């Protein structure tokens, strides 16, 4: 009875929120803006971010402040949604995954703040409920000004070891996409383990597929980047992969890791289950293509999923993708990137 109620209440609330998402017409308008102030003004006056941005001064807002405020809005939505999810211990424990995703986003925000030495960057504030359940003191991130300080905050958490090789480098040399892929692999593996151990029922298979696919996509990013940018050996690549795959056999994985260069690897992907998304003749960045795969999978699960946990996870992932689109537009404007190039980076 509780699950049926929570499924109905949460799904209805999520679909209402999803219905307010940015549309193609919004992105077209945003792409035509010439300044961060114009982007903020449009979001404030024409989109559901109006409440989150109601107190801003459009003529004085910085990109870091804008990102912080729209992220805070997402965190507030998540905090409100989990109240509809039921009172069972298993369900409350599962919702910790959403907080883990917040933690990864905050770590990456802190890394970019240090790397860019940007005094306008900000760490998004969290609702009180989320703050009390975090695995490290998120407030301390606002006072971190170097990688050594960030590692100190992360010490004793599941993020420390995966982040260590990246944060041991100088800020100008850090592989940010590699760090993001590594942190998200940890996140997905922990959630997958939780699902397998704690959950039962037919919808569990859909949740397992979501997180297994995400780990597989992170592995694909790691393999491609390791081959193209770092020319690592197969043995070294295998060391950084998470041993979870859902669409490739062990033999196929071995061939991709040991026997292919980056061109052959892309060709293999273009003949795999991901062929709709990977075209070597129309290739941008591996991260853009893998994020599009996740976007479509989560959209399907949001619309057709019956399990409230699956619907919530899908919504949060899609909302995060929307924020990344806004950030890409703002960054493109800041660095005078051609509009058509920015548009190709957007995942929708």
Image (tube, helix red, strand yellow):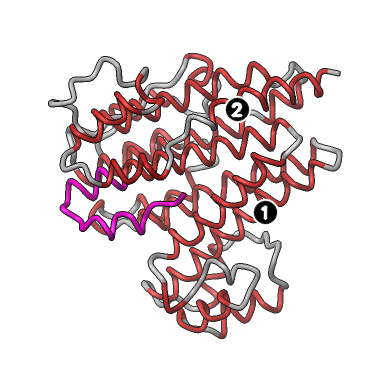
In the figure, 300 relative to 244: above or below?
Answer: above
Question: What residue is shown with label 2?
Answer: 14
Q: Between marks 2 and 1, how big is the CA–CA gap?
A: 23 Å
- Mark 2: few/some/many CA within 10 Å (<14, 14-19, 20+): many
Q: Earlier in the sequence, mark 2 or mark 1?
A: 2
Quick check: is 341 in the magenta stretch? yes
Q: Nearer the viewer, mark 2 or mark 1?
A: 2
Is 187 situated left or right of 11 in this image? left
Quick check: is 291 in the magenta stretch? no
User: In which quadrant of the rendered view does residue 67 lie?
Assistant: top left
Is 212 situated left or right of 279 in this image? right
Q: Main secondary structure of the magenta part?
A: helix
Residue reaching furthest to the left: 59
Q: Quadrant of the N terminus?
A: top right
Disc count in the image? 2
Q: Position of residue 337 (x, y in %)?
A: 20, 56
Which residue occupies the foreground of this view, 286 or 193?
A: 286
Is 180 situated left or right of 267 in this image? left
Callout 2 secondary element: helix
Q: Position of residue 262 (x, y in %)?
A: 46, 79
Question: What residue is shown with label 1?
Answer: 212
In the figure, 194 relative to 295: above or below?
Answer: above
Q: Residue at x 46, y 77 (%)?
A: 280
Q: Which residues are magenta?
A: 328-348
In the figure, 32 relative to 122: above or below?
Answer: below
Q: Position of residue 260 (x, y in %)?
A: 53, 84
Residue reaching furthest to the front: 25
Q: Residue at x 57, y 81 (%)?
A: 258
User: In which quadrant of the rendered view does residue 245 lie?
Assistant: bottom right
Q: Residue at x 42, y 24 (%)?
A: 73
């Amino acid at each position: 009875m509780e699950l049926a109620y929570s499924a109905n209440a949460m799904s209805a609330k999520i679909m209402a929120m999803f219905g307010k998402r940015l549309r193609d017409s919004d992105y077209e308008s945003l792409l035509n803006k010439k300044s961060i102030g114009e982007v903020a003004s449009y979001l404030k006056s024409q989109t559901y971010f109006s409440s989150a941005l109601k107190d801003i001064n459009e003529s004085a807002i910085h990109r870091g402040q804008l990102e912080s405020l729209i992220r805070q809005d997402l965190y507030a939505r998540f905090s409100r949604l989990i109240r509809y999810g039921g009172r069972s211990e298993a369900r409350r424990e599962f919702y910790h995954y959403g907080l883990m995703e917040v933690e990864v986003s905050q770590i990456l925000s802190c890394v970019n703040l240090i790397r860019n030495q940007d005094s306008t960057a900000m760490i998004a504030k969290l609702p009180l409920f989320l703050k009390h359940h975090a695995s490290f003191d998120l407030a301390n991130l606002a006072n971190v000004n170097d990688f050594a300080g960030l590692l100190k905050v992360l010490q004793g958490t599941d993020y420390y070891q995966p982040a260590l090789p990246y944060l041991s480098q100088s800020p100008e040399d850090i592989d940010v996409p590699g760090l993001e892929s590594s942190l998200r692999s940890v996140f997905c593996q922990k959630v997958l383990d939780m699902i397998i151990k704690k959950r039962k029922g037919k919808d569990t298979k859909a949740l397992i597929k979501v997180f297994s696919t995400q780990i597989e996509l992170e592995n694909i990013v790691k393999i491609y980047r390791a081959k193209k940018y770092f020319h690592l050996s197969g043995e070294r690549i295998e060391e950084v992969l998470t041993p979870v795959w859902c669409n490739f056999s062990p033999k196929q994985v071995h061939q991709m890791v040991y026997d292919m260069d980056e061109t052959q690897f892309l060709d293999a992907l273009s003949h795999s289950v991901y062929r709709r998304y990977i075209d070597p003749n129309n290739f941008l960045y591996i991260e853009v293509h893998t994020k599009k795969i996740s976007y479509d999978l989560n959209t399907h699960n949001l619309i057709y999923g019956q399990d409230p946990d699956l619907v919530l996870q899908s919504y949060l992932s899609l909302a995060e993708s929307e924020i990344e689109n806004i950030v890409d537009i703002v960054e493109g404007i800041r660095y005078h990137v051609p509009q058509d190039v920015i548009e190709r980076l957007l995942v929708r």
